Image (cartoon, helix red, strand yellow):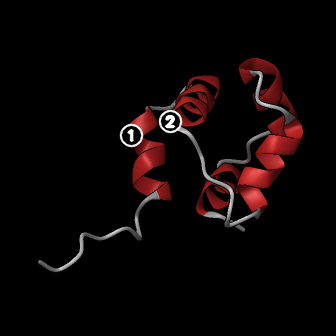
């Protein structure tokens, strides 16, 4: 499961409802939730945040928590 998939699961999100509200297909939401190779776009992230009535930055912080800058 991907980080966005874990986030949606942790929040007990109904993906069908998110799909209906955002226009993001249910299959795309499943792909984003399950496939590590799927890349979440900023547009998708923002729409998901609006549909969930959460601040988009809370999703970013959770989904990107493992990203670190390279040592310079």
The x and y percentages for residue 58 are 42, 44
Considering only order in the chain, which callout, 1 or 2, is on the residue closer to the N terminus? 2
**Quarter placement of the C terminus:** bottom left
Q: Is residue 39 above or below residue 19?
A: below
Residue at mark 2: 42
In terms of secondary structure, where does tag 1 sit? helix
Q: Quadrant of residue 10?
A: bottom right
Q: Is residue 70 left or right of residue 25?
A: left
The extreme left residue here reads 72
Q: Which mark is residue 18?
A: none
Q: Residue at x 62, y 32 (%)?
A: 48
The x and y percentages for residue 4 are 62, 54
Residue at mark 1: 57
Cα separation, mark 2 vs mark 1, equals: 11 Å
Q: Are marks 2 and 1 in contact (CB under 8 Å)?
A: no
Q: Residue at x 55, y 36 (%)?
A: 45
Q: Residue at x 55, y 31 (%)?
A: 49
The extreme bottom residue here reads 71
The x and y percentages for residue 66 are 41, 71
In terms of secondary structure, where does tag 2 sit? helix
How crowded is the residue under tag 1: few (<14 C-alpha within 10 Å), some, or many (20+)?
Answer: few
Q: Quadrant of residue 38?
A: bottom right
Numbered disc in front, either 2 or 1: 2
The x and y percentages for residue 8 are 67, 49
Q: Is residue 25 left or right of residue 64?
A: right
């Amino acid at each position: 499961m991907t980080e966005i998939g874990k986030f949606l699961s942790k929040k007990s999100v109904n993906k069908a409802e998110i799909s209906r509200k955002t226009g993001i297909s249910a299959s795309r939401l499943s792909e984003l939730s399950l496939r590590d190779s799927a890349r979440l776009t900023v547009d998708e992230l923002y729409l998901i945040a609006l549909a969930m009535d959460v601040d988009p930055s809370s999703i970013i912080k959770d989904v990107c928590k493992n990203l670190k800058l390279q040592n310079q």
